[in-house]
Image (spheres, grey):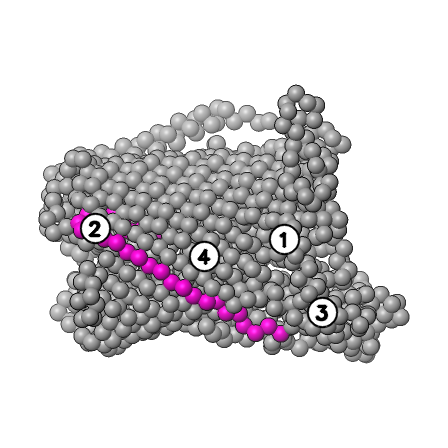
Amino acid sequence: MRDHLSTRLSGKKRRWILSLIAACCTMHVTLCIGSPHAMAADYGKPFLALDSVPNEEKDTTVISEYDVINTINRKWVNAAFKNNDTLNVQHVALFPYNSLQQMVKGNIRGLYTQEPSGEPGTEQFMYIRGLSMPLLSKKDVSQVQPAVYLNGVPMIQDNTLVYDIQNSDQTRLGPATNLLSIVNLDNVEEVQVFKDAAAISLFGPRGANGVINIITKNATSGKRKISVNSYFGVNLFDPVYTTNAQYENRFRRPFYQQYATTADSLSFPSYLRDSSNQGYFGNANWSDLYFHNTTQHSINASISGGSERANFRFFGDKTQANGIADNTRLDKYTGSFIVNMSPIKWLMASAMINANRMDRVRNTSMQDRFLETAYIPDLSNPLSPDKDTYGQYRDAFRKGFDRNHVNSIQGTFSLVFAFKQLRYTTRLLYDYNENLRDVFYPSTLMDGANYASNYFGNNQRTGFENVIDYVWTPSSDHHFNFEAGQSFQADLQKYNYERAYKGISDRVKVNIVESDAGKGNYLSPLYFANQLVYRYIDAEKQRLLSFYGNVKYNYRDIYRVTLTLRNDASSLVAPSKRWLLTPSVSGEWNLKNQFITQMPTLSDWTLHASWGRVGRMYGDDRFAAGPQYKVDMGWSGNPNAYSYTGVAGLSRPYSYGWVGDDIGWSYTDILTIGTDVAFFHNRLRISADYYSKDDRNMLLPMPVVAESGYASAYMSGLHVNNRGIEAGVSGDVIRTAKFQWTPSVSGAWNVNTLKALPGGVQSFVTGDRRFEVGKAVDQFWVYENTGGYSKVADIPINPKNNEPLSFKGVAFKPGDPAWKDRNGDFIVDDKDKVMKGHSMPVYTGSFDNNFRYGNLNLSFSFYFAGGMNILNSKTAVRYDFVNHDGQSNLESVKDITYWQHPENMKTYPQYNPWSAVIPYRADQDLFLEDGSFIKLRTVSLGYDLAGTRWMKRLAPGISRCYVYATGNNLLTFTAYTGGDPELTYYNGYDNGYAIPIPKTYTIGLKLDL
């Protein structure tokens, strides 16, 4: 192997010297600049949490707990302009959202949330300012998620290592619980979303896809404050139109009458033949067991208080969310504690612990079960739509178990030293979560062979940070803010997984092994056959070391400029290219203060711009290792087998792809230009931003010659551009002392373009997707359907050889679809497929109305997304029954929801399903539909009783007694015929297995004492 020792030594010295110079220069400017004066007025004064009461006799010589918030949690990012969108926490907290993704959906410009299932606790995804790379698998989805910070702690998410041993990435191994479900807005003071480079650069490479900064309510001094919040709600499901075998027979009869041969008729499925079989031809009342109107509830309480020198806050919560289908449920328990202590006036110590427990009762779908077992049994006869027969199937689950638990804890310990305008902060942080799943399926569910599996995975992140900031005001016109920082983060992600088949009895539900080390069968299974027990382990370590310096300059509140320089080193990058130096700059120009100070109708007008580069982190440590060996001795059903004929071994990663030497950083360049305008004493507010985001030098698994044995080779050079506009308008149409009406509308438009592929190639094909330079990366690759051929004369003939039009060598016949032959060679093949539509929305937004009359509040909000398409694969599979009946693949699984008929199902042409061209293949625009929608997402009505006379007499100590009622997900307007357009897979496919998102109605109380 090539020797890089001398290169690495010289490079290492060079990188350390550059880092040292950058850090020392910044520290020198910070510590040694001229005499300090009063703090700049715009430095940022944090406002109090909703449940805090200030101490009227506050000692101003003592460091305030709010200084801790400002410095540690980055409540105010040191940038030239307010470059973030803020969630209206007080309003959104009225609704029974169970995850951060649900909370921000439709409430933040330029942020799109994908909620592919209504099952509580399942994975959901967020995309800020578009799609930065092609989504080839679930691993790529994790690479485009924004970073989420909780009180300054970058929250670690589940690792993607398990996808290496899965046959499908539709559902990950383990509990697959959404780790961002731990957020409770009753414990949150502010949620900020940062999107431009000037702000992201202060968070580092983890924020390349944007940053969501969550700041919980802090410990406060003064009078003791107690808050209690609770709600109770009901979840309702929409009417379900069920079917049985008689309906399926009527659906198939026209195809058999027109196209079937005698042999085709003889192979008619057995479960559709006997009309006297009441299990299939009787009542289709399975929905009585599957769907239920359910309830959900939550109660939490907090207490805070203390003096200026020592104060605390404790928060506890219990929430239960029930799904409307398959008896799914999520139970959450939270305990959070924050304490601040100032033993001497120039020192503040702060500690935070946030602990959570989530228990998930997951679905019993056949598809998820087959994914877990990596085994698909005989599918000749599907589940029966009869309630009694389906009930027997559900009873079989009760003989086993499926336990899913997640424990997580986040914490910090910080020290803040303040000497006039100089402040030093040091902090230790950690984030740990563990995921457990124990499964046992009895033999009655597994063709006579029972199954057991155990999964334990954990993710842990520890970090150490140091920050020095200094404020210098040489005159009343000039204000400087200097900041220098260093951080180190260490991650460890690992899992242990074992699955076992064919135990001796359904009474033995765990894989017990021999515990006596003196026996020859030590650690061998006692009740499962050793050759049918499969073990998987994997782990990954990551390290991130960063140095940065930042300076902000303000001239008379007219010009503001910030400059940031940072140097980051990641263990995920090759050692010879481990360090990345990135700059960012931003500025704001206040035209109102400079030119139009005397115009009363114009309250504010500013222009701002920023540009910067942010490093992107890879999701796998193997890209830093170069050529390597891997456990890759398996087959399609067991890809990570570690032995061959009983002998353990390693091989080259042929099925995973070649990784070369010296793979450097990927990075993101972000340009933002915008303006903010306000009129009529800020009653009318307008904001708009244009951005261009270039993600460069990313990796892509490119095709290689078959003789190499590798499936692909990872190469750098992928470049994707996202550009768009974000805008918002809000106004106080009526603003009197008694009545206020504030409507607002916000929207975002985004398009992405593939600018370059590795190696300078112009197109790339993988699976059912094609990527072409100059086109979007989220487009479908489909045949264009122009109708069908009803007779021989309709089929085009090649004049050169008098041969009919063919599909990959198979001549078209009457009853076949007509697909456009775009290149005119009389052969329809992949060369004739077109890139069409988008799996991601082109535009998103919301329209809100808020009314207030005295203490009465009424609001409603519409949420919309458009420009995206959905490939209705569930309908394609239903029409393509010939190629899916009895097949042992996931697409052919007929779960109980198979016996459900959409209310507004689209009418499709009647082709010959037995044709060799596969007329109802999914990759054609026949099944590509418009997925745009508008939803009446929220309605709320509330009244604060604390302001009433009788409440003041009855309980004068109550500062808030807010009673309210809400409705959520109430109406949907869409042209999509397959149901809810939100229930799609990450690639835009609708397979029909998602649990619906319910309509939810709640009543609640928020009480402050």
From the image, state whether disc 3 or disc 1 is nearer to you: 1
Pointers 1 and 4 in contact (C-beta within 8 Å): no
Q: Residue 320 carries which label?
A: 4
In the displayed structure, would residue 635 be above or below residue 21? below
CA gap, disc 2 to disc 3?
66 Å
The residue identified by callout 2 is 224
* Residue located 76% across and 55% down the image: 378
Please tell me which of labels 3 and 1 falls first in the chain.
Answer: 1
Q: Eyeballing the image, is 139 above or below 991? A: above
Relative side of 446 to 969, left or right: right
Q: Which of 107 and 832 is in front in this view?
A: 107
Crowd tier of the residue under label 2, counting other residues whose Cα lies within 10 Å: few below 14, some 14–19, many 20 or above: some
Is 151 situated above or below 959? above
Amino acid tagged 1: Arg
Amino acid at dot 3:
Tyr
Residue 879 is labelled as 3
The answer to whether residue 58 is visible is yes
Front label number (1 vs 4)? 1
Q: x%, y% of residue 605?
A: 23, 65
Q: In this view, does 783 lie above or below 24?
A: below
Q: Which amino acid does label 2 sit on?
A: Arg
Q: Give the range drawn in magenta.
A: 214-241
Residue at coordinates 26% horizontally, 54% vertically from top-left? Answer: 226
Chief secondary structure of the magenta portion: strand
